[in-house]
Amino acid sequence: MNEVDTNMESIQGGKIVFAEDVVATIAFLAASEVDGVHAMIGTTMEGLSEKLGKKNYTKGVKVEVGSEECACDITIVIKYGYRIQAVAQKVQEEIKNAIETMTGLKVVEVNVNVNGIYFEPEPKPEPKAKVKAKAEPEPEPEPEPEPEPEPEPEPEPEAPAPRVK
């Protein structure tokens, strides 16, 4: 874990030091609360550690912490149907406010990388269970009516002119 001396003096005259993971976690949690953000995208190693059962609160977030300032890069997936620009700006605002409020560091930049769009899966129709009564015999199927002869196809109209030159 990288620790950075922020040269902030506490009431006792000591120093306050923020680990980069602390600032990254603040940014992750702030971004995840923005409406329209589906997920943060991290590296393969970050995904592997999650599969092993460790919750990763810094996934997709990179921060640089200086003595009085910090910068943040975050990679997100946005839900389909949301205005991408508006969601990205809200992520920037929320991360900046959260870090400055919780740490006292000045946030000089928040770079938002939109890496994908999430589509809600369509619900699958549930199969209807067929219940057969044992006492009643199945009705015989009705004979199918004979198909009517197909009319001759009409000639196709000319294709419209292309919309884009």
Image (spheres, rainbow, N blue to C red):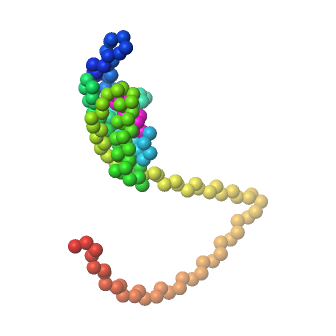
User: What residue sits 74% from the left and 57% below the top?
Assistant: 134
Front-most of residues 57 and 121:
57
Residue 82 percent coordinates (x, y): 41, 52
User: What residue sits 52% from the left and 54% below the top?
Assistant: 124
Quadrant where the image shows the N terminus:
top left
What is the span of residues highlighted in magenta in the rendered image? 23-32
When asked about the image quadrant of residue 103, the answer is: top left
User: Where is 84 relative to 97, above or below?
Assistant: below
**Lateral position of residue 99 relative to residue 148, left or right:** left
User: What residue sits 31% from the left and 19% below the top?
Assistant: 8
User: What residue sits 30% from the left and 33% below the top?
Assistant: 107
Residue 48 percent coordinates (x, y): 35, 32
Residue 25 percent coordinates (x, y): 38, 30
Front-most of residues 133 and 111:
111
**Lateral position of residue 126 relative to residue 10, left or right:** right
Q: Main secondary structure of the magenta part?
A: helix
User: Where is 70 relative to 156, above or below?
Assistant: above
- Residue 28 belongs to the span the image colors magenta: yes
